[in-house]
Image: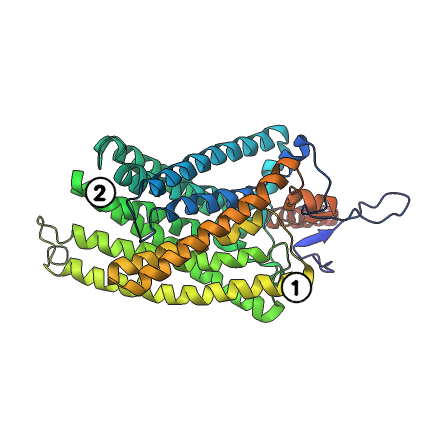
Amino acid sequence: MSVASSSEARPQWVSNTPSSGGPLPGLSYGYPGKQAMPWRERIRNFTPAWFYVTMGLAITTLQFMVIPWHHELLVLKVIFLIFWLTTLLVIFAFLGLTIARYVMFPDLWQKVWDHPDEAMYFACLPMSLIPMQNGMSEGLDLWWGLGGHNSARFLWFIFGCWLATTLLGYTIAFVCFKKMITVHRHEMKTMTAAWLAPFGALIVDGSAGTLMTPLLAEHNPSIGMFAGLWATMTVSIGLSVSVLVMAILLQRMFVDGLPPAKHIWTSWSVLSVTTQAGFTILALSGAFNALLPVHYGTSKLLTHPAIGEIIYAIGITIGMVLWFVSIFAIIFAIFAVWTVSKQEGLIFGPNCWAWVFPFGVFAVHTYGNGLYFDSQFFRVLGGILNIITILGSSVMIVLTVPQFFRGTMFTYSYVVDDEAMGIQYSHKQTDAARSIWAEEKGDMSLN
């Protein structure tokens, strides 16, 4: 991060240099040669970006459900269940470490939210929970028949979990949006695709309700319609803001090039937005085709015999267009990571898991195209992408688990790293308050 000469710049260097005149402490990242940290320091460095790992694990559990061949094999169901339960335990463990971080170091809570990069990663938590809920409705309920096939009680429980997760997603998106406007200072050259996380999470949040809508409609059509509309609203808001942020990201790259190595893995967030929106809209069109037309009321639109088919046609077309855009997003992400890694080296940390979730969603999106278009090409391609996701996630697990327990991949905290480098961030509200105070002091001196 470059030194800014203007007071308006986002990062400002302050002198933490010891009296002997030695240099500021340097940073080295955790893989492969870093010494192990004690658990207290691991917890201090446990950033919200670690939920990239649970996002990757959660989407990997769904891959076993959408393999297009021998779908009913017991071995697939068992592996799915093992992955699902393991991911659930990891999520609870990471939540425990997160709570411990802010209990043991309470000053970090405000610092993280006020940090223009690290705050964005809180959105990884709801994005970890949504695939788990998809696994509950599509896997535990329909595939395993837990509590009876399409059990009403179990379905209402999943529905409640989904509503709570979407409210969590809205809360994080609003807080991040407010912080970005009122607190964080930004420069174009320091902007990264991490800005997409809080709003891309809303698109992810909508997907679970989309898949539950037809199931809920079998028990209560009104609740099913509510779920479909709530999912539509959530996806619409998330996609609208994400498109605007992607325009800023494109300008940033045109003007200042690619982000540095520590932030380059966020380039996969573009794929996360495009393919998740495409799959969710695809599934929404099928859900509304089952719900519509309604047979009550006087609305000419909702009672029209063809309304369901019209929405279905529009939805699968938009889903297909976004699938094409997602191909470009994959090429861009690979190019970005490859280019920066060649120039600066590969930094292995939790952010390296950022590719697993969007790539896994792209595999599911491709599988969905195979179902809706009845296309053997998409079925085969989807199966290949499923296997790549499972194998890639397995490699990431093998690389991550030993480093996690040895404590050698925890030097990836933005707030802690910046403090070690002597960087302080000026905030809009703080600077505004100082300006008002200075003006008032000047007026008093004149009087």
Residue 293 visible, this orientation? yes
16 over 311 or under it: above or below? above
Q: Which residue is mark 1?
A: 342
The residue that appears at 32% across and 51% down in the rendered structure is 233
> Is 388 displayed left or right of 383 in the figure?
right
Q: Earlier in the sequence, mark 1 or mark 2?
A: 2
Estimate the x, y position of residue 287 in percent, counting from the top left: 22, 51
Q: Which residue is mark 2?
A: 215
Residue at point 26%, 57% (across, down):
371
Taking depth in this image into account, of 380 and 416 the one nearest to the observer is 380
* Amino acid carrying mark 2 in the image: Leu
- Work out whether residue 219 or residue 109 is closer to the camera in this orientation and state it: 219
Q: Secondary structure at mark 1?
A: helix
Report if the CB atoms under discs 1 and 2 are less than 8 Å apart.
Answer: no
Callout 2: SS: helix
Q: Is residue 114 above or below residue 382?
A: above
